[in-house]
Image (cartoon, grey):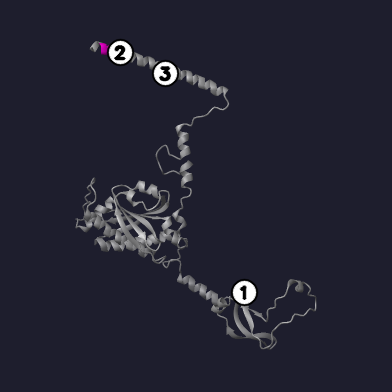
Amino acid sequence: MAEDMEEQNGGGDVDQEAMMAEWEAMAEEDGDGGDGHADGAVGSTRVLDQNEIDSLLGVDASGGDDGDKSGIQAILNSALVSYERLPMLEVVFDRLVRMMSTSLRNFTSDNVEVSLDNISSARFGDYLNSIPLPAMLAVFKAEEWDNFGLMTVDSALIYSIVDVLLGGRRGTAAMRIEGRPYTTIERNLVERMVHVVLGDLSAAFDPLSPTTFRFERLETNPRFAAIARAANATVVVTLRVDMEDRGGRIELLIPYATLEPVRELLLQMFMGEKFGRDSIWEGHLTSELWQTEVNLEAVLDQVELPLREILNWTEGSRLELNASPNTKIGMRCGDVAMFNGYMGRKGAHIAVRIADRIALDDLTEGE
């Protein structure tokens, strides 16, 4: 039996070698025939190589994302709105950093430094796929805007906060235990920190538009924190929290749909701490307005005539006005009525004596 199996295996090897030789011969014949056909045919098709396919799709062959995107990827991302078109948004987050530094110091009773790492735009689906796990994702709602946002706390900051709040000694790195879900104590401590950050975020938006950011829920799976469609554009703000030798990152994600109610306010330029108001500039403008010279027109009467009659006027034509020496005349600045008065003469000049002032409320009621 063994000899028979060896003979069969040997025969199988021979058959396989023969089959491979036959396939190579067929491939050579097809290649020769294909070249000949390409030379003789006009409508031959050309196959793209891998480099051309990568270039078309906008994929970097080296795997780096630092370069400019091209191809289909650039077309897809061309509609992504840049946060730089909202100048006031950066001012709001600068205020948030200053407020968080004070609030987290009071919350942890430790020396906390908060810094703004980056503000960027991203699509919601791409951001969810880029979240390093494990992490905690807090979903919050903007009450006045009736929409949602997302706050991501990375594992380094989670363990650091737990270590600080539970009395961990300074100078030792926070203990990280991977591969297990977060405990109820850890979730509750992080939730308390999220409430502090949301309170500061509401205060940062208050001078621009009073908004209440209310905590909704805490998730550990990004799939359960889907507050927008994957293709929706969002603003991602990365904040760095340092507590001496411990710390981590907090990322705030706010969809552009959430910011839509205050979009006009975010488009204005920053003129000082009062969000668009500068008292010094207002003082200069007021003083200059008081010294501005304007022209006033005294209107004796108004008469409506058809154009045909006006075109028939000649030298010496007379226009009758329904005004007497005791009739009030109107004084206007451009198209705005300002005063009522009486026409008179003072010396060699025609003068008008002001009788009363026309208020803006009277003009609106008349209209």
Q: Which of marks 3 and 2 is nearer the N terminus?
A: 2
Query: What residue span does the magenta drawing correspond to?
Result: 4-11
For this view, does 268 lie left or right of residue 111? right
**Which quadrant would the N terminus be assigned to in this image?**
top left
- What crowding class fits label 3: few (fewer than 14 Cα within 10 Å), some (14-19), or many (20 or more)? few
Q: Earlier in the sequence, mark 2 or mark 1?
A: 2
Q: Which residue is drawn at 46% across and 60% down?
A: 263
Q: Does the magenta stretch include residue 7?
A: yes
**From mark 2 to mark 1, how far is it between C-alphas?**
109 Å
Tell me, for residue 23, which label it has, or none: 3
Contact, mark 2 vs mark 1 (Cβ under 8 Å): no
Q: Earlier in the sequence, mark 3 or mark 1?
A: 3
Q: Residue at x 68, y 81 (%)?
A: 301
Label 2 element class? helix
Q: Quadrant of residue 93?
A: bottom left
Q: What's the amino acid at mark 1?
A: Asp
Q: Which residue lies furthest to the right in this view?
A: 315
> How far across and how far down the image is residue 150, in percent?
35, 55
- What crowding class fits label 2: few (fewer than 14 Cα within 10 Å), some (14-19), or many (20 or more)? few
Q: Name the residue under label 1.
A: 335
Q: Does the magenta stretch include residue 148?
A: no
> How far across and how far down the image is residue 52, in percent?
48, 34
